[in-house]
Image (cartoon, rainbow, N blue to C red):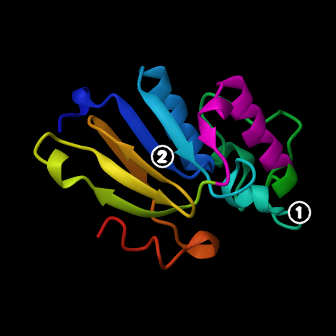
Amino acid sequence: MAWREVKRVGIIGAGVAGLATAKTLLADGLACTIFERGDRLGGVWAEGYSNFGVQVQKELYEFPDWPLPSDAPNFTPGPIFQKYLEDYADFFHLRSHIRLRSRITKLTPRAACRQAGGGCRLRQERYRYSWRPPITVFFCRKSGVRWDRAMSSLTD
């Protein structure tokens, strides 16, 4: 499928990458839904990294169009960075595109739609969604604290 034909996008994860992806695609006029398995946006930062923080200077870990507050310390502590992500989502009106408590356990390409260039079935722990073409699903393979064996083969 040609990128110009994409109209709807599903994004798995409302962490840093998911939020930035949604913001960019929405600005380009694409419909987006972000599926977040947690109770709030932020990815690992929402899990209470109170004793941890960003491992680089703040200028190296911020959105280019949304700088960290000038009074934010270098090696930004987790709770401050979580607030930063929430403020980003509010400013760019991303919350209405996020489905919280939506852990995706399986992605299945729709066989009838492969030649048409898209479509997939997303399986959540309790629900199934069928999206008809054109759709693209962005999946960022997790490693580290969010790695999930069940999700590791989704795109293989």
Compute the Cα span from label 2 to label 1.
Answer: 27 Å
Image-based side of 121 in relation to 65, left or right: left
From the top left corner, tell me how far across and down residue 27 is, in percent.
48, 21
Front in this rendered view, residue 78 or 19: 19
Q: Which residue is mark 2?
A: 11
Question: Mark 1, residues whose alpha carbon is within 10 Å: few (<14), some, or many (≥20)?
Answer: few
The reply to whether residue 77 is visible in this rendering is no
User: If the image is split into quadrants, where does the N terminus sit?
Assistant: top left
Residue 84 counted in the magenta span: yes
Where's residue 15, x and y in %?
Answer: 63, 51
Q: Residue type at mark 1: give it.
A: Ser
Task: Where is residue 119? Give x, y as percent.
Answer: 28, 44
Residue type for callout 2: Ile
For the point 32% across and 38% down, the residue is: 135
The number of numbered badges drawn on the structure is 2
Q: Which residues are magenta?
A: 80-101
Which residue is tagged 1?
50
Give yes or no for contact between labels 2 and 1 (Cβ–Cβ under 8 Å). Answer: no
The nearer-to-camera label among 2 and 1 is 2
Q: Mark 2 Cα within 10 Å, few/some/many (few <14, many 20+)?
A: many
Quarter of the rendering containing residue 140: bottom left
Q: Secondary structure at mark 2?
A: strand
Relative to 101, say whether 31 is above or below. Answer: above
Q: Give the percent coordinates (x, y) of residue 10.
A: 44, 43
What residue appears at the point 23 percent right and 28 percent down from the top-left corner?
5
